[in-house]
């Protein structure tokens, strides 16, 4: 028996005794006694890391799994940190001298069990808990933290991950996921906690169930996003099909759409059923075309204008509309963000609602076409790290100084207001329907509206390549890939010379000027770093490389421009031809990166 297996066995054997329950003990004993120790090693070779966003992992027994014991330890550490900050006078709005948190969950298996575990342990530490009565969208949890003036919160969710996963998102008092220094402070406290430190003796008097009243307040906040009510009223019969993919948007999204004035809303009945096994999809990820199949089929039957989905925790969206041939096309995350920013800026200006202090946000891996729009319209745009906690950080930095009107990322997330500090599918869905209503009011489809943007600002195709490497060896392989890119960066990509490189881990960039590389610093909020590399070529190509923080994969983001004549009508045929030209370059780009 090698040393690694000895260590794993020693840890696993602790899980065959108290305080672990009988089911957990039996499952661990079965792994210990199995001839093949692969499952045992993967379950116990490390403790599931509480990262800057919390926890996410495969459910099951073991230190490297999501289960009530790992959730309990994380919550005890988070509680310790909240109380520590309170003692140091770090909170401004503590009511009655007691720290408060909001706890929610989505539709995933064990979601309610984990959420109640979280609530019980917080209450056992003397912390007031507002626990949602049943599943709710992630953005509503963020909203509730702000509405109730809580100091933090937890949402039990693994977002759009496969059914085997669950997770734990930690939030701070402004309703955003925790950032430095609090993220590291929580991590340090969590790492100190042993199972013996966990306080299980819940104080039920400190747990308050919330639900309908918060739903109403949240729905009213979503309604505040509306820009052009007249277009909606004229196009109230816009034919909309919606699916929550078995998740948390099932009630609130149709309610919000009706509150905006839309009256012709249909839902996919099979996917309105709450089910953490997601029986109607391979994976509940709106980025995957397969997940939209049932919605598209219903849309075809009903002659719908739009098919829209939210993911299980209702923070991400997917949008499907008809092209100029009447065929269904999926609008990707970059395209939705382009349309949101273009519409918000142009229509707020048209209606006299735009102010000089207003600004928009995108992440560093999101389409540069948004920058073209912002620059042409004289609107401030900031680039932030991937993850809405960074967009929330920008809102916090400029609160009271500038007015946030929208921000998003390429992975199908958008936030059009500052009442929430995480991506928000209910408001994003209502707003895309408003955009479609405005387009229809002006003799266009949503697809035509997208083509109009390409006509005004030029065409580029964004493509994401995911290289999946699961398990311990996969994590090591991803780490080695990033090391190799840093040691041997590509000088050419698809035959185009690289003229700018950015390394957000070192916060250094190098630009090719007059045949020489000139290095300079990159300024990012909080001087925070991120394990992201970017390459820009002389032909306008942009490549970003980023290991996922929540899944066992490394992501490659390609932005491929295709030359067009600005101002010339851009047709569906043009779109198809430009898309084909861009996609034809993908193999050469991959080859340049050794993929």
Image (cartoon, rainbow, N blue to C red):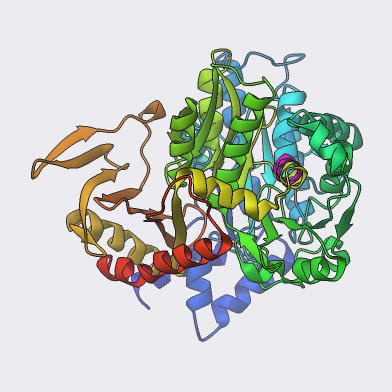
Task: Name the foreground residue: 550 vs 196.
Answer: 550
Quarter of the image holding residue 500? top left
Q: Is 524 left, or right, of 389 in this rendering?
A: left
Task: Name the foreground residue: 459 vs 210.
Answer: 459
Give me the residue at 80% from left, 65% from top. 299
> Where residue 117 sits: x, y (%)?
74, 47
Residue 46 lies in the magenta stretch: no
Quadrant location, the N terminus: bottom left
Quarter of the image holding residue 197? top right
Task: Name the foreground residue: 366 vs 314.
Answer: 366
Q: Is 188 left, or right, of 355 in this rendering?
A: left
> Where residue 370 sits: x, y (%)?
48, 40
Quadrant location, the C terminus: bottom left
Q: Residue furthest front?
A: 568
Residue 428 lies in the magenta stretch: yes
Give me the residue at 61% from left, 52% from top. 70
> Where residue 465 sits: x, y (%)?
44, 65
Q: Is 30 left, or right, of 390 in this rendering?
A: right
> Where residue 393 sits: x, y (%)?
52, 28
Residues drawn in magenta? 427-435
């Amino acid at each position: 028996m090698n040393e690694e297996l000895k260590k794993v066995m020693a840890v696993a054997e602790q899980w065959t005794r108290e305080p672990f329950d009988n089911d957990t003990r039996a499952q661990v004993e079965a792994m210990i006694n199995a001839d093949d120790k692969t499952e045992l090693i993967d379950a116990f070779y490390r403790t599931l890391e509480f990262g800057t966003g919390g926890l996410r992992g495969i459910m099951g027994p073991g230190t490297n799994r999501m289960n009530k014991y790992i959730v309990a330890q994380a919550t005890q550490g988070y509680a310790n940190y909240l109380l520590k900050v309170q003692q140091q006078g770090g909170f401004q709005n503590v009511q009655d001298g007691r720290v408060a948190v909001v706890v929610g969950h989505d539709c995933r298996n064990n979601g309610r069990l984990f959420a109640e575990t979280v609530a019980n342990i917080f209450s056992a530490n003397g912390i007031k808990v507002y626990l949602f009565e049943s599943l709710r969208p992630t953005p509503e949890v963020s909203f509730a933290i702000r509405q109730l003036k809580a100091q933090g919160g937890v949402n039990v969710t693994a977002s759009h991950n496969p059914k085997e996963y669950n997770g734990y998102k930690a939030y701070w008092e402004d309703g955003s996921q925790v950032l430095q220094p609090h993220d590291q402070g929580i991590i340090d406290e969590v790492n100190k906690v042993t199972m013996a430190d966990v306080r299980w003796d819940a104080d039920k008097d400190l747990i308050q169930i919330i639900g309908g009243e918060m739903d109403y307040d949240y729905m009213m906040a979503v309604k505040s996003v509306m820009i052009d009510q007249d277009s909606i009223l004229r196009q109230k019969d816009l034919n909309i099909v919606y699916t929550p993919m078995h998740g948390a948007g099932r009630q609130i999204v149709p309610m919000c759409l009706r509150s905006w004035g839309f009256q012709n809303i249909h839902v996919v009945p099979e996917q309105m059923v709450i089910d953490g096994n997601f029986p109607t999809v391979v994976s509940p990820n709106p980025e995957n075309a397969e997940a939209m199949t049932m919605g598209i089929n219903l849309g075809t039957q009903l002659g719908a204008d739009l098919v829209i989905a939210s993911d299980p925790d209702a923070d991400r969206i997917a949008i499907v509309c008809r092209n100029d041939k009447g065929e269904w096309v999926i609008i990707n995350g970059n395209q939705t963000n382009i349309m949101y920013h273009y519409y918000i800026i142009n229509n707020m200006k048209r209606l006299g609602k735009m102010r000089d202090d207003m600004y928009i946000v995108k992440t560093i891996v999101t389409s540069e076409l948004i920058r073209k729009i912002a620059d042409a319209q004289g609107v401030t745009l900031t680039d932030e790290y991937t993850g809405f906690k960074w967009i929330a950080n920008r809102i916090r930095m400029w609160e009271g100084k500038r007015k946030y009107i929208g921000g998003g990322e390429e992975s199908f997330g958008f936030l059009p207001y500052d009442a929430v500090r995480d991506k928000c599918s209910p408001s994003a869905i209502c707003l895309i329907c408003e955009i479609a209503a405005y387009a229809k009011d002006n003799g266009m489809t949503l697809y035509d509206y997208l083509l109009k943007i390409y006509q005004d600002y030029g065409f580029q195709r964004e493509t994401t390549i995911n290289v999946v490497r699961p398990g311990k060896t996969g994590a090591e392989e991803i780490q080695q890939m990033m090391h190799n890119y840093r040691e041997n960066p590509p000088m050419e990509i698809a035959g185009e010379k690289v003229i700018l490189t950015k390394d957000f881990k070192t916060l250094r960039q190098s630009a090719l000027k007059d045949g020489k590389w000139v290095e300079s610093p990159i300024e990012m909020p909080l001087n925070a770093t991120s394990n992201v590399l970017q390459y820009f070529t002389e032909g306008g190509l942009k490549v970003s490389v980023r290991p996922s923080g929540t899944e066992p994969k490394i992501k490659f983001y390609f932005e491929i421009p295709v030359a067009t004549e600005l101002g010339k009508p851009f047709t569906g045929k043009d779109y198809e031809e430009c898309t084909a030209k861009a996609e034809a370059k993908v193999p050469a780009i991959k080859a340049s990166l050794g993929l």
